[in-house]
Amino acid sequence: MNLPLRRHPANDPASDLQQALAGAARFIRMHSIASIYHAGSGHPGGAMSSADLFACLYGAEMNVWPGGVSDPTRDRFVLSKGHAAPALYAAGAHFGFCDAREALNLRKLGSRFQGHPHVLDLPWVETSTGSLGQGISVAVGMALGLRIQKNPARVYTMLGDGEMQEGEVWEAAMSAAHHGLARLTAVVDYNKLQSDAHNDAIMRLEPLAAKWRAFGWDVQEIDGHDIGAILDALRNTGLNAEMNKVPSLIIAHTIKGKGVPYMENIPAWHGSVKFTRRQAEEALAALGATAGETAELLDV
Amino acid sequence: MSSPALIASNGDSLREAFGKALSSLADEFSNLVVLDADIAGGTGVHHFRKSHPDRFVQFGIAEQNMMAAAGGMAAVGLVPVVTTFAVFCLRAIEQARLSLAYARRNAKIVASHPGLDVGPDGGSAQALEDLAAFRAIPGMTVISPADATEMALATRAILEFDGPVYMRTGRSPAPRLFGDDHAFEIGKGQIVRDGGDLTIIACGVEVARALAAHDLLAADGIFARIVNMPTIKPIDAALIERCSRETGAIVTAEDHNIHGGLGGAVAEALAATRPCPVEFVAVKDVFGASGEPEELAHHYGIAAPHIAAAAKRVLERK
């Protein structure tokens, strides 16, 4: 398979940034469906809901680039909701951090693309995650460490909504505010569903924005599938936080399974699920895959 | 109005030796940062807080966040030393597993208040499981020095070592066992008293008790070799094999539960090399209770007379 080379949209002045990011998000969704199909297990729902966020973070907001994965000045990203690994890998493939074909080899013995990200396999994922609540603490440690080193790099992390039921998240929230970590941005993929059911049925999160504000964070709420809104929020985040010396949270309201009608808002598609060939084809078709793209992704 | 007398780290305790060593090494190890969860006075790192406040990071009473944040600090090139009580390291062990060991971070966990040595705070505070739990984490080095001299040497050694380490200090005053000529190397035990009838292998506060047992046994004409085994993982299997070959019987002694700590590590090494009869002096799969450390050692059967009795039992099995 030879997937077309995707350039960092910022490097391509001929393209409209938002169109390019929408294209990146589409690729992330399609690649995630394909890798989970090949793996025979995985978490598609959260990969679909977070795809637009990944596209904006890697495609526009963060100062990271494939050749600079060990450059000390790079921005750091920590996937606190580690089970969205397929979307992270797909974003990495789209923006040149890893090979798109190799990244289809998900959850297989000998593959670097484990079910949850592992930094020893893939240095560009920055740290190993998969146990909910830890990623945001690691991000707090990075932001503290960078500040001690007088390094201006920013740190980004993505949280799941169910993840916020972990007490460690609130320990991290308190510490980030206490230490005034203005260069830390957390994004919540707020798709309202967790493993077994709706958040409200498992353990209520609301009033979520008020909680984070009470913990001392700058909070914005956006439509997590509106590329322009995501870009604006990420940029405002930096400004607000620097001005107020507080960490930033973006609550991105998303739809679990976004882009695949049979999956949208159905908790069963959280994972771990096994796609049939027909389901994978139907999902790719819903995402607008051409026959050629479908063959490239599924007939490896 | 007078201030209350605070019972903080002081004297010849291992935590005090650790705190002072850390402070004195800070200029040499410029990437060193110290993480605290509101017990700097208890862990001995109040010395570091005073000498290097810009590299002392307060996390409040939130050990899980502190442990994982250490992974983030290590990820950007610092060498974090996470300090808290041993029992709270157990609380954050999954963070130590994923964000430190699995990611192979160069981070150090230094735990004060291990075992019955905690004393009057009682059973809830006496971690008797930490050596076993941290030993079970792949790639985790586990160390328990015996006196203040060795603690200072071990503090330097873990900073020179590249990888995740769990190290016990100790709460209570501990006798000086070693002189200025003492050497410490990660992964090496040493014979501190020679003898040919059996070998007693001990770590931490039990080394002093093993030396006392040596004298009790000598009075009965039994000559025990005493081995200080400050590194529980990786265990010095070559020395254990040699002691088995040369003395034919082994007693282990530790301020820890009988399962999975030093005794378990020694037994594993013996099973793989040269098996011999072994007796384990340790807390017998129960929790501790309030009391002074020496009282507790007698109550729970890890004092010098218990080590001597175990030596006589193992000789009968020889």
Image (cartoon, rainbow, N blue to C red):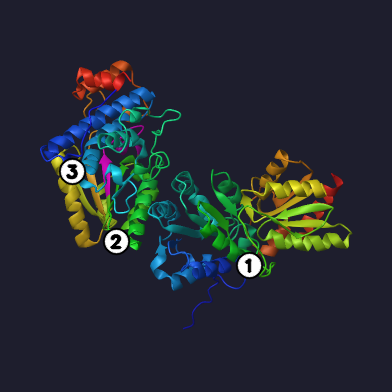
Residue A267 in view here: no
Give the labeled residue for mark 1: B149
Amino acid under disc 1: Thr
Quarter location, residue A124: top left
Q: What is the spatial separation of the Cα atoms under label 3 and label 1, in whole angstroms?
A: 57 Å
* Mark 2 or 1: the one toward you: 1
Chain ID for label 3? A
Chain ID for label 2? A
Give the structural element (helix, strand or loop) at label 1: helix
* Closer-to-camera residue (B1/B220): B220
Say few, some or many: other residues with alpha carbon within 10 Å of mark 3 (under 14 / 14 to 19 / 20 or more). many
Quarter location, residue A190: top left
**Range covered by the magenta-colored residues:** A186-202
Amino acid under disc 2: Gly
Task: Please tell me the numbered disc located at residue A180.
Answer: 2
> x%, y% of residue A132?
39, 42
Q: Is residue B190 left or right of residue A185?
A: right
- Residue A197 lies in the magenta-colored region: yes
Say few, some or many: other residues with alpha carbon within 10 Å of mark 1 (under 14 / 14 to 19 / 20 or more). many
| Badges 2 and 3, same chain | yes
> x%, y% of residue A284?
24, 22
**Vertical arrangement, residue A121 with respect to residue B63, above or below:** above
* Closer-to-camera residue (A167/A140): A140
Quarter location, residue B267: top right
Task: Tell me if label 2 and label 1 are in contact, CB under 8 Å.
Answer: no
Task: Please tell me the numbered disc located at residue B230.
Answer: none
- Residue B51 lies in the magenta-colored region: no
**Vertical arrangement, residue B207 with respect to residue A266, above or below:** below
| Badges 2 and 1, same chain | no
> x%, y% of residue A242?
21, 59
Say few, some or many: other residues with alpha carbon within 10 Å of mark 2 (under 14 / 14 to 19 / 20 or more). many
Q: Residue at x 58, y 68 (%)?
A: B17
